Image (cartoon, helix red, strand yellow):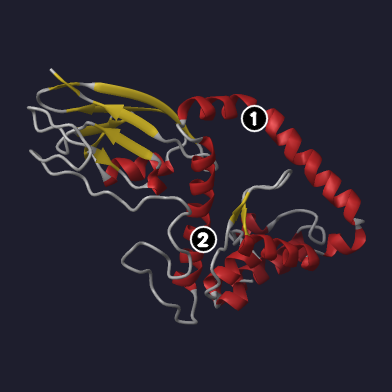
Amino acid sequence: NLSVQGRFNDSGQELGRFVINTMFGLGGLIDAAPSFGVGKVAADTGQTLGVLGAGPGPYLMLPLFEPLTVRDAVGQVFDSVMDPTSWLVPFEIGFSSSAVRRVNDRALSLELYENVEETVFDLYGAVRNGYLQRRRALIREGRAKSRWGHRKATESGSDGADPPDVGARPPVPAAPPEQVTPGAAASGHGGGRLEADEESFLIVDATPSEAQVVLDGQALGSAGELLARAVAVARGQHTVEIAAKGFRPSVARFVADPSFPARVRVALAPE
């Protein structure tokens, strides 16, 4: 996959890992490559198809499977066929083992799932957009490292192959001071509505654009894209504090995970 994507440096690194693990890892039974400073570079057929320009297709939620698009489903079929173990292990046993592993992983993460369900407003939307954003990021990374000269991202934020998330609204720019974006109630203190785009899973409601944002005690600056990015990449339990002159401070706690990014709603009320 790395070679097909045109990522020859990463392909050479994976070849080096193979040689090192074969020679010093008991024929590949032990991952000895990290001891030699050679890390793993992951790639899959779904990512390769995206790098080459294939669109994602519809988003799928299938029992006992992770979130998928049609492109990634096709990629998983190719990856399974290319996996040597699939030729040795009967399909029924391999599928049953995968299903049991997924159910077990779900059971071991009950607390995380409960926290996520309590935190997000739309669990399906959060899972969908989190998956689609992660896949788009991998495709962009592949294109950035490719030597095939793929087209760059468009101004709309798409990677050139993937359209915006299914059902996602276009990004709404932060309202400037003393202005109110459409649909928001005006206030005497210049309060407006700040709403980050869907991919950040953040909604800041009735918050003035000059509000100062603090994440886990670290000042990030004004509300808007900066906070949105912080939430999108955050992990674990976090506290968001927003304060602005003329408004009562607001504090929100949330749990974010790479697989289930949190959507947070924080608001300031006029004093």
Give the quadrant of residue 80.
Answer: bottom right
Q: For this view, does 121 lie left or right of residue 110?
A: left
Residue 79: give x, y in percent of width and height: 73, 64
Of the 4 image quadrants, the one containing the C terminus is: top left
Going by the numbered disc 1, the residue's amino acid type is Ser
Residue 43 makes an appearance in the image: no
Which disc number belongs to residue 138? Answer: 2
Residue located 79% across and 43% down the image: 99
Residue 204: give x, y in percent of width and height: 29, 34
| Mark 2 closeness class: few <14, some 14–19, many ≥20 residues within 10 Å | some
Of the 4 image quadrants, the one containing the N terminus is: bottom right
Residue located 47% across and 39% down the image: 261
- Mark positioned earlier in the residue sequence (2 or 1): 1
Going by the numbered disc 2, the residue's amino acid type is Leu
Residue located 67% across and 71% down the image: 15
Per the image, the residue denoted by label 1 is 109
Residue 89 makes an appearance in the image: yes
Q: For this view, does 154 lie left or right of residue 99?
A: left
In front here: 196 or 184?
A: 184
Q: For this view, does 93 lie left or right of residue 201?
A: right
Q: Is residue 234 above or below residue 27?
A: above
